[in-house]
Each structure stands twice: as C-alpha cells, then as structure tokens.
Amino acid sequence: MVSPTPLQAFSAVPKASKTSKQTLVDGEKMTGAQALIRTLEDLGVQDVFGIPGGAILPVYHEIHDDTKFRFVLMRHEQGAGHAAEGYAVATGRVGVCIVTSGPGATNMVTPIADANMDSVPLVVISGQVGVDAIGTDAFQEADTVGITYPVVKHSYLVTDAQDIPRVLAEAHYVARTGRPGPVVVDITKTAQVSDMYYSWPQKLLLPGYNPTTKAHGHVLREAAKLFEQSYRPVLYVGGGATRSNAGAQVKELADLTDSPIVTTLPARGIVPDSDPKVLGMLGMHGTVAATAATQKCDLLVAIGARFDDRVTGKLEAFAPAARVIHIDIDPAEIGKRRQADVPIVGDVAEVLDALNAEIKRGQAVHGKPDLEPWWKLINSWRENYPMKYDETTPDGTLSPQWVVEELSRQAAPSTIWVSGVGQHQMWASQLIDFENPHSWISSGGLGTMGFGLPAAIGARIGSTRDFGGKKPVWLIDGDGSFQMTSEELAAAFIDNAPVKIAILNNSVYGMVRQWQTLFYDKHYSQTSIQDGENDADIVNVPDFVKLAEAYGCVGIRATTQDEAKAAIKRANEINDRPVLIDFRVYKDAMVWPMVAAGQSNDTVTYVPGVQPLLHNSADSDASGNQDDSDYAAAATSAATAEK
C-alpha cells in the first residue's frame, strides 16, 4: 500500500473555518512574516542565503536595511544551499536559506541531500501556496515536505502564523544538535500574512528527541581493554569527529595509545598533517600507508565515521582481522555496515574525553603494548609508497598535481580550502598540507558537482564574519564542475566575497574519463567539453578569463609553471574581488593510488602494475614492501612477552 505524502495527506483534511479567531493575545502583534524575521534575529542568525519569489514574498518584504542579519542574494537556489553549507562548515553555525515554493524549493533538493549525507546543519525555509490552494495544483505548488522527506533530518509544514517562532526555534535546535543535518520549514503564504502574537523565548516541543551525548562507563572500560590487547590499532576518523570539534581529543587518543590516524575525506585536517601519526586519507584514492594499515590492523576504532563504500571497498574484505570500536552520535550508523565489538553512542568529543581518561587509568596499572613492530611496518609503507606523480606531461601542459602542490606551497597557513567534485577533489585531499581543522570543505557523501563555487562563497562570508577575512578561501575546481554553478560569480563579486579560484582545466570530465580509460575500453563518450586546450583550433567555450572579467572578477590564464607561480602569487595579493586562474592541465592525468569500485582494499594500485598488498606481485616485492610474516612474528613475540 502506498501512503500519501505529508502534503497530500494535509490536502485531504477539511480546512478550518475562515472565521476562526486568534485567541492568544500575549506578546507583540505582528504578521507571520515579521515573526519569521524576528525569530531569526532572536536565534542569533547573522547571515542568510537565498532568492525571493512569489510564495515567500511577504517574508522578503520584511527584510530591511536595519535587519540584524546579512542577506546574501545568490543566483540559483542550489547555489544558496551550497553557500549555506560552506558557511556552516567554516563557522560551525547553522546555515540558513530562504527560498520560494515550487521550483525554488525543488532546486534546493540537491543541497539538502548533500547536507544530509555530510551531516551539515541547515535550516531551509521555503514558501508554500496558501492553505486553501494546497492540493489544487496551484501556480508554483509542490509538495516540498514530501519531496524532501527522504533526505532531511526533520521537516515542518506551517499553516498557522502563531507556530512560526516555535517551529523555527525547534528547527534551529534540531539542525545543530545530535547528528547535525538539514531541517526544512515549509511555510504557507496564509501563515506569512496572518496576524500572530510574538514572544521570546519559545518553548521547544520535541518529545522523544533526546540525543545521547555521554557514553556509559561499561562500554568505555571495554574499549580501553581492547586497546590494552591490541598491537596493531588504527584510528579511523570521519566527518562526525570534525562536526564535534574533536581534533584535540583524537590527537590525545593517538598519543596515549601510539595509534596511527587515518581519515575520511571530510575529516582531512582534523589533526595536522605534520603530525607523524597522521597517515592521510584511506580508501579508493587514499594513501597506501593509510589503506594498508587499516587492512592489517587488529583494532579499528571508527570515530564519527560510517564505513562508506568509498572507504571500505568490498565490505567483507575490509579490515578482516580487526575488532571494532565504533563511536558515533547517531545510533542508526552503528552496526549498519560493520558489526561493532564495542558500540559507543555519544558525542565524539565527550566520548573521547571519557575514553582517554579510562585509558590513562588502565595504563597506570597495565602499561602500554609495544607497537614498535607495527610502526616499523607502517613506516616502510610510507617510505616505499609516498604520493608521487609525473611533473612533466606528454603534451607540455601543466601537471594538475603540481598545480595543487604549488597552491599549497604558496598559501597562507590559515587558508580555507574548498573543492568541487572530481579528480581535482582527490588531488586536493592528497596533496594539500592540512594543518587546521575546518580548513577543508568538500562534498563527500553525495559527490555534488557544482558544490565548489557557492560553498566557497559561503565560507568566505563566514571568514569575513568570524575572522575579519584573515582566513583566505581558495577553491580548487574542475572546468566541468565549475560550469554547473558558475553564475554565482555574480554573487561573489557583488556581495564582496573575494574567493580565489583555481580551475584545473583539462577540457574533459576528468574522473569519468579516468574510469572510461580503465574500465570502458577508452571509449570517451560525452566527456570532452572543449573549454580549453593548447590548440589554436579549439574555441574556448567558455573562455574562463573573459567569463571572470564579465562578472567583475580578475581572470588569469596559466599554461607554464612560471606563469602558474606568478598567477598564484598575484591571486594571493588581491583581496578586493574574486580571482579566477585558468590552469591548462593534462587531460589524461590520473588519480593514484586507486582501489577499483567494489574490490577489496588489498588490491590497492599504487601506480599501474604495482599492488603493494598482493604479496604474489613481483612489482610489490621490487618496490621494497616488507612481508607481513616478519611483522606478525614480532607482534606474536611481543604479545607473549607482555603476558
């Protein structure tokens, strides 16, 4: 049986009499639209993103020069959503959007889904047709609550003006607490124009919503005991640790237990890359050391991570000998893909504070396991399989990897890095030196092309708000990904968000082309976008330099290393407007290491022909990989001695 969506169900309910009167008279009389603006101000919201439209016009009518929050007018609702995401990740606050009904709200579906996958706190306020028009296929009517229902943390349909302050207060609270996520508040035009009586603060009515933040003592003792018994531990750190601001606690745990740290894409920078315990990102395009350590560990500590398929590869073959401690504030994630030996539900920072104290107590009595053989093996992977690439290219274009490294070399340590989605995203994660938490913003779970530019604008708005603009924002994007939301250059210029944009322009959809090369017989179907090659016969459509200049931005093109160095230096010196650099890079460059989709992480390919974890591979032997048997013997001996 198919159940009706929330709005369909509502439309079948008899409407209240038009003569019904407001009986609550406590508070200041105002319209619902005025109450919405007042509520956002009382919640402390400082920046809002969006685009107006008919069904939300009463709300926009109440935004004035003296409104306490800054409104950033984007050029597309999807851009508004991604900008709010970038703002939320950069600042730690809730991102807020206000859009209209119908197509305005449906354009928000992608950023809502993106925020849901990456646990980004958003409040999306959408207009809706009047109560009497619901269910009649009125102009720009869409069942926003029903459409977004599968990809939100919570949602509301507001039909009564008196409910607006309470609902918005609840939405803001729900979005930022527990596992953060997007909340949709769909407000009918009826509620916007009706009178109500405003008071503050509002009492939250959230029965049953009580996120667990503190762990029970017995699971902490069990987890500490597993550390005492482990000779090959790995801390597998995900985006949940970043959302919890748990970088200091993760580092303390690593130092206490001498455990290596591997991260997912969203967790890059949670502990500085310069820390010797950080092995980098693991999984499909992770470092060999991070992926190998995870495969060979005997204790896997998942910290705010969800065992995503891009991390695990073939799930049954992921860390096959490991016992698992899984720490997450969302109980639905624990056991969803990998059974945990010790499941711990709670806020990562609070759990790790308690776990670290428990481990200290245990170490005072039992001491610490000898992990020297483990680190000897890890360091052999590091030494034999570092990140490397060819700096020269067959056609004389720039190496995209070299461009990313040069950007990192010249960047200020406080830089916030943003990426689109594709090869450039992986190179950025692999090659940038991340030394600060919240310095990396990227679309992880949903992999949304077009995310980069609006997210960078939101991050730059946040940098201006919280840091006086002293944290510059660099966007590393691909020519394909950039064109999906390039209209937001207008918002970047007009709303004074001087982002710096590096386009790795290979004139193709790079990651798709890489898969076509490796898995689809080099049949490059519909992946050439011809927006720039070192060929006089190719017309640049678009010409990114001219495009940037058309939007009031500075446009620069670089085709050689000397030009690239000079362009980056110049971009770093310009802070009064956006700067775009069109780097012409090699279209057949590939992202290595790589694990093919659905394969075991043991098949990780360092470079073509070299698979370090397959011990029958002559190439891996030639690369100097240490045989695990030596390590295993040493670990067994150490364990016996410990007993």
Image (tube, grey):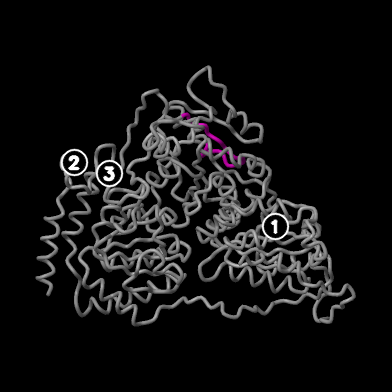
Q: Quadrant of the C terminus?
A: bottom left
Report the residue that reaches farthest toward the front: 1
Image label count: 3
Report the residue that reaches farthest toward the right: 19
Q: Amino acid at mark 2?
A: Ser
Q: Which residues are magenta?
A: 571-584
Residue placed under numbered mark 2 in the picture: 623
Q: How far is mark 3 from mark 2, CA to CA?
A: 11 Å
Q: Amino acid at mark 3?
A: Pro
Residue placed under numbered mark 3 in the picture: 386
Q: Quadrant of residue 543?
A: top right
Disc number for residue 178: none
Residue 258 shown in magenta: no
Q: Amino acid at mark 1?
A: Ile
Q: Mark 3, mark 1: which one is toward the viewer? A: 1
Q: Give whichever of discs 3 and 1 has the lower sequence position.
A: 1
Q: Secondary structure at mark 2?
A: loop
Q: Are marks 3 and 1 in contact (CB under 8 Å)?
A: no
Residue placed under numbered mark 1 in the picture: 98
- Callout 2 environment at 10 Å: few (<14), some (14 to 19), or many (20+)? some
Q: How far is mark 1 from mark 2, CA to CA?
A: 56 Å
Left/right placement of residue 402 relative to residue 208 reads: left
Q: Quadrant of the N terminus?
A: bottom right
* x and y percentages locating residue 69 in the rendered image: 69, 60
Q: Give whichever of discs 1 and 2 has the lower sequence position.
A: 1
Q: As rendered, which of 308 and 88 lies closer to the eye? A: 308
* x and y percentages locating residue 224 in the rendered image: 28, 75
Q: Mark 3, mark 2: which one is toward the viewer? A: 2
Q: Secondary structure at mark 3?
A: loop
* x and y percentages locating residue 249 in the rendered image: 38, 67
